[in-house]
């Protein structure tokens, strides 16, 4: 599949098979995230790979959706705002860099035949405490990772003509 096919193939999957994620696939997915670009190449990101059932149970206090825990792996993408590039007007690019890494990760997962669902609606303080994040590390996104059980239909996108202005 080329990258445009992968982009079209990706879905937010909310139902997973128990089947484990092969180590080589997980490594290729994390490698794609590692290779993401970042502002001024500061690479202010890190990844938490969660397989421990005890930790997953504790995470329910941060994000209490049963489907989320049907996947064998959960990945947390974090930013390190002290390390990231800041624009002249003070804007911190940490979360943007983390989001790019997350996007690389979910597209690489799609290529591997695995599914993901970007989740942002978690309680940040609980995630920090459950993952024992050192101070200065901010959880930006979580995703389950596993083989999809049910693959949803594509969701609506605005037509390009609504989004583009040629000037
Ligand atoms: C930044 C971001 C945050 C999201 N947070 C959540 C979330 O907390 N819970 C959830 O179920 N889906 C979440 N989603 C998934 C979106 O709902 C989903 O991408 C959107 O509805 C389009 O569907 P699709 O991904 O299948 O194309 C999030 C997606 C993005 C990009």
Image (cartoon, helix red, strand yellow):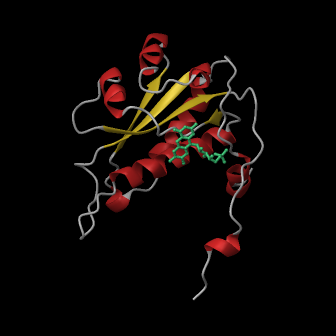
- Toward the viewer: 22 or 126? 126
Q: Relative to residue 166, is residue 82 drawn left or right?
A: left
In the rendered image, residue 140, in percent from the top left (x then y), is placed at: 40, 41
147 up-or-down from 162: above or below: above
Q: Which of 27/162 is in front?
A: 162
Tell me where residue 106 appears, x and y as whole percent: 58, 42
- For ligand 1, the image quadrant comes to top right
31 up-or-down from 52: above or below: below
Residue furthest to the bottom in view is 167
Residue drawn at point x = 30 percent, y = 23 percent: 129
- Image quadrant assignment for residue 13: top right
Which of the pair 88/63 is nearer the observer? 63
Residue 35 shows in this picture: no
* Outermost residue toward the top in this view: 54
- Say if 159 sits above or below 85 in the image: below
Who's the residue at 31% across and 30% down the image? 125
Residue 49 position, x and y percent, is: 46, 27
Q: Which residue appears at 27% of the width and 48% of the height?
A: 81
Location of residue 51 with respect to 150 vertically, above or below: above
Q: Is residue 24 left or right of residue 2?
A: left
> Measured from the top left, where is residue 137 in percent x and y?
28, 38
Give the number of marks. 0
Is residue 83 shown left or right of residue 72? left
Image quadrant containing the C terminus? bottom right
């Amino acid at each position: 599949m080329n990258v445009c096919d992968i982009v079209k193939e990706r879905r937010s999957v909310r139902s997973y098979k128990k089947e484990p994620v092969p180590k080589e696939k997980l490594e290729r997915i994390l490698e794609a995230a590692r290779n993401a670009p970042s502002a001024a190449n500061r690479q202010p990101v890190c990844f938490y790979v969660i397989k421990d059932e005890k930790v997953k149970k504790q995470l329910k206090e941060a994000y209490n959706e049963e489907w989320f825990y049907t996947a064998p792996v959960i990945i947390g993408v974090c930013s390190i705002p002290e390390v990231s590039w800041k624009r002249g007007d003070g804007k911190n690019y940490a979360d943007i860099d983390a989001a790019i890494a997350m996007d690389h990760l979910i597209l690489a997962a799609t290529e591997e035949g695995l599914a993901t669902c970007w989740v942002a609606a978690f309680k940040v303080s609980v995630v920090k405490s459950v993952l024992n994040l050192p101070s200065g590390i901010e959880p930006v996104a979580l995703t389950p990772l596993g083989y999809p059980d049910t693959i949803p239909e594509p969701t609506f996108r605005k037509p390009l003509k609504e989004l583009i202005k040629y000037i």
